[in-house]
Image (tube, rainbow, N blue to C red):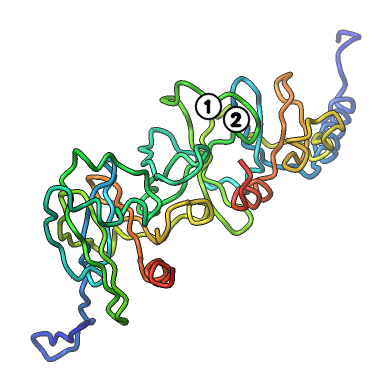
Amino acid sequence: MSQKILGDHGHTLSPVFNSTLEVVTFYVGGQRCALDARQVHALRTLPGEGSRKYTAIESLLGLPEQNNACLQRQLLTIRLPESDVECSVSVSVPVQLHELEFDVIHPLPDLVAARTQLRGLCALGMESDGLTLIFDLRNLLCEVVRS
Amino acid sequence: MNQQEITLDQVLSQQREAKREIVNVDEPTAKLVIFELQGEWFAFQGEKIREILSQVDVFFVPGCPTSLQGVINVRGDIESVISLHELLQLPESVDISSSSYLLGSGAGMSSTIRVDKVVDVVDVLLSNIHQPPTTVPQHLREIVSGIVQFNEKTVTVLDLDRIFADYSHGLG
C-alpha cells in the first residue's frame, strides 16, 4: 500500500509505504512469538477444560510443550487469506495485536535457518525489549490439513 | 683511530646487506586471528573474520542445537552465535562473561563464533603454517587446515568455510 505525496510546489516526493506489519503475539515459555495478523481469523476464550480438545500451538510449531493445566488458554483460529484452509489451536494468554516496524524484522541468519527445529519459523523481530520469533503458517497449515 | 673502529665502507656494506635481508623476508604471509578455547589455541584466517566483538547481548532462540547459542544484533543486522566447543570435543566454558565473538564469513554464510578469549591477530609467514600432522584426532581432520607455532604454543588453524558448511548440514 503506498501513496504519493505532493510537496508545497507540486513536486512529487518519494512514496510513503506502510512501515509496520501487524502481528498477533503470544508467549511460549517466556519467549514472544508472532503470526502475521492476516493469517489469524479469530480469537476466543476457551472455557475451563476446553483447551484439551484442541491442538496446542506449541506442538504445531515444534516449541516445547507447556503445562497447559495451569495456564489460561484461548482459541486461535488460523485461516490463510488466499485459501479456505483453516485450523484452530489453543494458545496461552496474553494474546495481543502488535505492530512490528519493518526495520526490526530480519530474515533468519543462515545457520539458524539451517538448524532450527521449529516449524514455520521464517523471521526474527528484534525490538528494544527483546526478540520475537515470527512464524509463517502457510506451508505448515496445508500439511496439517492434508494429514 | 681505534683499530676496531668500523670504516665507512663497512658501514655501507652492512646497510646494503641489511636492506637485502629485508627484501629476503618479504615472502607471502597470512593474517591469523588466534583465539583460546579451554586453554587450547586455535586460529581462523584473518580474511574470514570481519569483526571481533565483546560485551554483546545474546538472545536465545529455542529449537536450535545447544551449540547454536542464539542471535545477536550487530548494528541492525542479526547474526547467529555458535560455540565450537562441542565440535572440537572440548568442555563448554562455564563463565562466558569474558567471551569474545568473532564475526566470520565462510561458505556463503556468516555467523559469530563465541570464543573464550582472543589471543592476538598476527601476520604469519605462509611457510610457517604446516600441514596438519597425521596425529590430528579424527574429529578434527576435516576442519583443520594447518598448524603453526606462536609464542611457543601450537595453534591449530581451522577452516571456517568447512565449519560453516558442515555445521549447516548438521555437524556439531
Nearer the N terminus, badge 1 or badge 2? 2
Residue A106 image offset from top left, x and y in percent: 37, 59
What residue is rendered at 20% in x and 71% in y? Answer: A41
Front-lying residue, A123 or A41: A41
Residue nearest the viewer, comparing B123 with A42: A42
Q: Amino acid at mark 2?
A: Phe
Dot 1: chain letter:
B
Chain letter for mark 2 = B
Q: Is residue B25 above or below residue A117?
A: above
Question: Which residue is the site of mark 1?
Answer: B116
Could you say which is closer to the camera, residue B69 or residue A60? Answer: A60
x%, y% of residue B80?
46, 47
Amino acid on which the number 1 mark rests in the picture: Asp
Marks 1 and 2, Cα distance to the nearest angstrom?
A: 7 Å
Looking at the picture, do discs 1 and 2 lie on one chain?
Answer: yes
Q: Is residue B161 above or below residue A35?
A: above
Neighbor class of circle 1 (other Cα within 10 Å; few <14, some 14-19, many 20+) is: many
Tell me: residue A20, above or below residue B25: below
Taking the image as shown, residue B9 lies to the left or right of residue B99, namely: right
Which residue does the image show at 36% across and 41% down from the upper left? B59
Label pair 1/2, CB-CB below 8 angstroms:
yes
Snapshot quadrant of residue B131: top right
Residue named by callout 2:
B35
SS class, disc 1: loop
- Residue sitting farthest toward the top: B2
Residue at the image point whose x is 29% and y is 62% from the top: A103
Left or right: where A63 falls relative to B144: left
Looking at the image, which is closer to me, B4 or B157?
B157
